[in-house]
Every structure is written in C-alpha cells, then in structure tokens.
Image: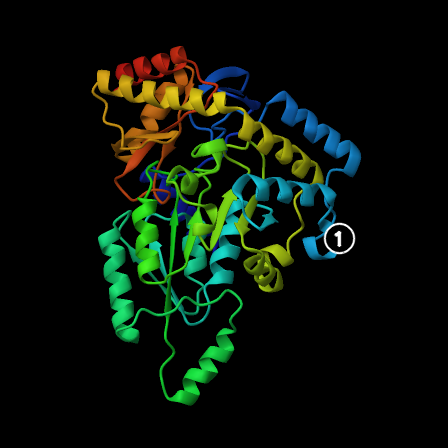
C-alpha cells in the first residue's frame, strides 16, 4: 500500500471517530492508573482479581528472574521448557483437573493453535458470531471452512448441526479423533467413491469480552453430545473469576473442564500476568505438540513469568475473598445503573458494558470522564459492530464502593 493511501485511510477513520491512538501510561496498579502525572480510577483493565500487583506475585517474579533469568532463550521443544514451566503446568493441571497443559506466549497464540490444530481438513468449524478476533482469524485459515451461528443462540447452532448431519446421512457423524490423520481419511473416502464427510466442531467463549455475557454451557454441552461435536472453549475472561477456586465457566456451570476437548485461557486477565495456555487430555497435548506452529516456532514464555503465574494461580485458588469482593462490586454496579436509569448490557461478569451507539459520542464521553479522573475507554468498530460503540466498564476486586459511586455520578453528569 502506498503512503498516500495510508494517509487517506487514516483520515477516513478519524472522520468516522474510529482512529486509534496509543497512550503511554506511567503505571497501572489495582483499581488505579497514572497518566502524564495524573491519577485516575481505572475501569478499563482486565486485572479482575487484583493479582497483577499482589506482593506475593511480584516477589515470585523477582525471585524467578534472579534464579532463572529474564527470558527462556528458546522455543519449548528446543531449550525453552524449563522447570518453572513444568511446575506451572502441574499447578494448572491440579487446579482444573486435566491431564495436560501447554503454555503459549499469548492467549491469541493459544486460541490460534487450538482451532488450527484441532480442526482437520474434513472438519467444519461452527463458531459463535461474537467470538474473539483470534478465533475468527484462525477460522479464515481452516481448509474445511467455517460457519457462524447467531450469538449465544443454541437454536441457530442446532440448525447448522442438523444441516451438517443431513449432508452426511441420517446418523450423526462420529467426532474426529484428535490423532486421526485427515490425509488417511480423505484417501479412504476417495477409494470408497464418497465425498469427504465433514465433522462439526463447535467453538465459543465462556465469557464474551465485549458484551460480558455467557452461553448456556449445560445446554450447549448437551447439543454437542447429541451431534457428537467436539467443543473448543475460550475462557479467557472466565478463568479465575467463575467457579469453585476460580476454575472457570465450565466449573461454574457444574461441568468438568474435560467437557471441552480443549480449553483456552490466559494469564493476562484475572491472573494478572502474561501468556496463555491450553488445558486438555494428554492425547490432545501430544497431538498438538507435533504440529501446533504457535507452540513449536515461538520462544517460550519467560521462566520468571512462569514462577509468578504459579504463585498467582495459588493465590487465585485460595483467596476466595477476591471473587467475593468482585461479585459485590458487580452487584453494586448494577444497582447504581438501575438507580440512575442507565441500561447496562445483560452481564453477570466483571465486564459491564454501557451501550452508547455513536463512536464520536462514546469517544467524547470517555474524554469528559478522563477530565474528572476516570479512565473508561470507548470501545468502537471494528472491535464491536458499527453503531454499537460502548463504554466497557470492567471491575476488579480492588474497587471500592465509593469508586463506583464516583463513576456513576460522573456518568450521569456527562450524559
């Protein structure tokens, strides 16, 4: 693309109220942040449990760096996987009651590895329409293609599953094994004179990042079992927050983590760190280790970060007060919204979105709130659909009741 074209496109985005600009913060700690020497109440972070600056986690990071250095110096299969990584995997396996955990440089990379690695050539991915960009980008690369069902609409998903069942015969197809060779299957189908039969694979999120809502995982699981479709779950915003010991959305729904063929979560939200992971059976992990490019060809996460995240998972599991405090803040946020007649999108998560609609207006409100010491970013297209710009209020266990009162008093004054 030529420089002139870039300039023109940037001008178009600015005129539409969609231009993104990077702001360099002084620091972010708990429920507050500092920018250009001024302190703000922070309602735009994902540190849901307040673990990013927890003294025990910070101390673990420092000790990890002292013991193992800053970087892993290699990919996991070459020289990157070290004792701290294995200890972190073991802690998560015990936490989520799974056989295996794989670590990745980011949740984005983990999601890509999950979808690209577990959807074979003869699989058809069925993806929730509001799924994260990492899942959509992976879906676009799948040789078997993908279809999207309406957001959290199980009847829409069932129509796609029925259509796929009809396409391959009256009997629901058997789920493709994680270690089955798609090349061998295609060859067998060719020899028999039949067209390759696509197995449906369902992918969705435990908590959706922009709306804060969740699917009915019990009903979704029953549907997947009925049509023998593997379930791949992105639980980036559910892990740590929902379920006993923060074990995530499946646990919150009364389901085992192993209900999903593979679960993706990350360390950058409730656990307050950096990186991502996949939790699955040993067979699935062994299979992905053979071909998951995001795992094979990326430098492993820092061993110091692995030490810190082991400490963070332990704090998450045992500090129930963090989830209790967050739940109280969610309830208080909703009560204040009702008091002032502000219509938040339906959500029982730490994400409480206030729909504005127009991008220019959402940006202006965000800027006016900043003048009053409140950091609440405007979320605009393409992160959300056009004309659905919003103020995405995100809460943490460290917010005080008074912080939320200040937020809503300011919102009312601005609106």
Q: How many marks?
A: 1
- Look at the image and tell me whether residue 109 can be seen: no
Where on the picture, by quarter, is residue 165?
bottom left
Q: Nearer the viewer, residue 145 or 311?
A: 311
Q: Nearer the viewer, residue 241 or 366?
A: 241
Colour theme: rainbow
Q: In the rendered view of the protein, which quadrant contains the C terminus? A: top left
Percent position of residue 197, x then y: 36, 75
**Which residue is outermost to the left?**
341
Q: Is residue 59 left or right of residue 381?
A: right
Percent position of residue 131, x then y: 37, 49
Q: Which residue is mark 1?
A: 79
**Which residue is outermost to the top?**
402
Percent position of residue 399, x then y: 44, 18
The residue under the point 40% across, 14% down is 403
Q: Is residue 180 left or right of residue 255?
A: right
Percent position of residue 96, x then y: 52, 42
Q: Is residue 385 left or right of residue 82?
A: left
Tell me if residue 21 comes above or below residue 7 in the rendering: above
């Amino acid at each position: 693309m030529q420089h002139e074209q870039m300039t023109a496109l940037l001008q178009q985005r600015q005129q539409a109220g969609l231009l993104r600009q990077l702001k360099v913060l002084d620091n972010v700690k708990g429920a507050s942040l500092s920018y250009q020497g001024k302190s703000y109440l922070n309602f735009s972070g994902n540190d849901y449990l307040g673990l990013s600056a927890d003294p025990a986690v910070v101390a673990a990071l420092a000790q990890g760096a002292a013991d193992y250095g800053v970087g892993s110096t290699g990919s996991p299969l070459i020289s990157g996987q070290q004792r701290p990584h294995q200890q972190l995997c073991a802690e998560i396996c015990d936490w989520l009651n799974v056989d295996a955990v794989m670590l990745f440089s980011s949740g984005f990379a983990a999601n890509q590895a999950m979808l690209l690695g577990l959807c074979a050539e003869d699989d058809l991915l069925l993806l929730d329409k509001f799924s994260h960009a990492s899942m959509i980008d992976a879906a676009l690369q799948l040789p078997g293609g993908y279809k999207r069902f309406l957001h959290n609409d199980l009847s829409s998903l069932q129509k796609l599953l029925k259509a796929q069942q009809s396409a391959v015969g009256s009997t629901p197809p058997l789920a493709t094994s994680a270690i089955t060779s798609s090349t061998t299957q295609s060859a067998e189908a060719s020899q028999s004179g039949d067209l390759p039969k696509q197995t449906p694979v369902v992918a969705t999120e435990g908590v959706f990042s922009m709306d804060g809502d969740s699917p009915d995982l019990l009903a979704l699981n029953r549907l997947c079992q009925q049509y023998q479709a593997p379930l791949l779950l992105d639980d980036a915003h559910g892990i740590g927050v929902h379920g006993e010991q923060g074990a995530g959305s499946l646990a919150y729904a009364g389901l085992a983590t192993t209900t999903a063929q593979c679960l993706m979560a990350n360390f950058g939200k409730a656990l307050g760190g950096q990186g991502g992971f996949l939790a699955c059976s040993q067979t699935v992990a062994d299979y992905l280790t053979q071909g998951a490019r995001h795992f094979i060809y990326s430098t492993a996460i820092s061993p110091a970060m692995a030490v810190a995240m082991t400490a963070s998972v332990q704090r998450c599991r045992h500090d129930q007060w963090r989830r209790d405090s967050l739940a109280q803040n969610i309830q208080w946020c909703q009560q204040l919204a009702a008091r002032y007649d502000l219509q938040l999108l339906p959500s029982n998560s730490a994400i409480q979105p206030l729909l504005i609609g127009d991008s220019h207006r959402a940006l202006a409100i965000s800027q006016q709130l900043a003048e009053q010491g409140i950091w609440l970013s405007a979320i605009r297209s393409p992160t959300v659909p056009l004309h659905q710009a919003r103020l995405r209020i995100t809460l943490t266990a460290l917010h005080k009741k008074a912080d939320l009162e200040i937020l809503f008093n300011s919102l009312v004054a601005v609106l």
